[in-house]
Image: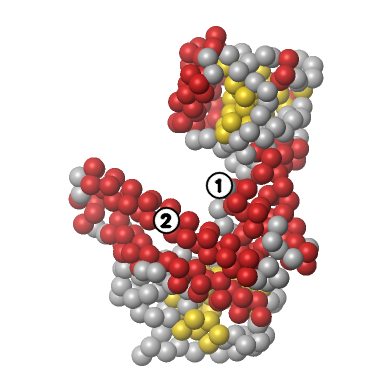
Amino acid sequence: MFIVKDYKKNAIYGVNIKDGKFHIENKVLEVPGYYMMDVTDSASSQDQHKPFEIYLEDGKYTIEAETGKLANYPKVKAPSSPTQQQLTAFYTAADKMNGDLNQKLAQLYAKVNSKATNALPKDQFNALLNSVSAMESQKYDIVAKAFDRYVTQNPQNTIGAHVMLRMDYESDPVFYNNIYQKFTPAVKATEDGKEIGDKLSKLVKLVPGHEAPAIEGKLINGKPFDPKSMHKKIFLIDFWRAGNQVARINHAEIKTMLKDFGKGGFEVISVSMDTKKDWWTTAIDEDKITWTQVSDLKGDDSPNTQNWSVTRLPRYDLVDGNWHMIERDIPFSQVYLDVQQHLNKHP
């Protein structure tokens, strides 16, 4: 089956492929733009893949996919759409660098989702998941290199900024910012170019060693917040909200960290993303929080959201005593060990 959906996952086109062919009658779209397409084979569980991007505008599109290789980007020919030609060129080049990695990954996913896998011992199932994770990481590295090469050769192509927005640029903002700087001024001036440029400009300031952004807001007693007056070796920045139960549960673990490391120069700064003071203060009382609390009570509109690139709560960052970044967006299960290791390095 061939399917095209919008970004809200509403189906726009859908047709069965019979005898290796399909045809879609003309249909008027409200606006030209990026959509998601999928080519699926219900008879094969080893052709699983994520939907592909396609740019639809006036004109004729010829789409060809190969059985057994549906995880590769289809051959999309659209003579009247320069944007789609650019998309096809990039994703085809990335698939070429991937080799048969897409197919191997699809086969692993099929194995993970098979009924037989449910009966595997836990250690074997975990080993299978680790294989998937390792192969996903390998694919990520290849696609990142392919993207860098593509932008280097085609800095004027407008899809560059759009594709980057869909990539894992937060994991290595310096790498992606270097690619971004290769874009022409016209690409940077597009809507996608402005968005990714704004995001990267903030993320590069959060890399290890860089001076951490200021934290906007006041202490719970209304006094100004100044971390440099606290004279600590390491700070855990805890972004949270009173209504977030995960953050509230984690506060109990943070108490243990302070008990274990507080005398060694460790401190916690909790930054509330609440909008009402009574919600904030009530949660502090209920959780019996004794460490530093800061908030500007602006919620998602707080400068802290943008300056620290907070996209979900809770969020945990580590900052050293000179207010320089150590690590950002750390899984909470890893925070205790990271604090311990840093204090051991700087006794």
Residue highlighted by disc 1? 171
Q: Secondary structure at mark 1?
A: helix
How far is disc 2 from disc 1 in space, using C-alphas? 14 Å
Above or below, comparing residue 40 to residue 280 in the picture: below
Residue highlighted by disc 2? 138
* Image x and y of residue 57, in percent: 66, 81
* Image x and y of residue 113, in percent: 31, 58
Q: How is the image coloured?
A: secondary structure
On the rendered structure, is 158 left or right of 47?
Answer: right
Instruction: Using the image as rendered, state which of residue 16 and residue 343 is in the foreground.
Output: 343
* Image x and y of residue 264, in percent: 54, 12
* Image x and y of residue 185, in percent: 78, 64
Name the residue located 40 percent from the left edge and 74 percent from the top edge: 70
Above or below, comparing residue 309 to residue 137 in the picture: above
The amino acid at mark 2 is: Gln
Which numbered circle lies on residue 26?
none
Q: Which quarter of the figure has residue 222?
A: top right
Q: Secondary structure at mark 2?
A: helix
The amino acid at mark 1 is: Ser
Name the residue located 59 percent from the left edge and 41 percent from the top edge: 312
Can I make out residue 189 in this image? Answer: yes
| Pointer 2 local density, CA inside 10 Å: few below 14, some 14–19, many at least 20 | few
Instruction: Using the image as rendered, state which of residue 323 and residue 35 is in the foreground.
Output: 323
Name the residue located 59 percent from the left edge and 21 percent from the top edge: 234
Q: Quadrant of the N terminus?
A: bottom left
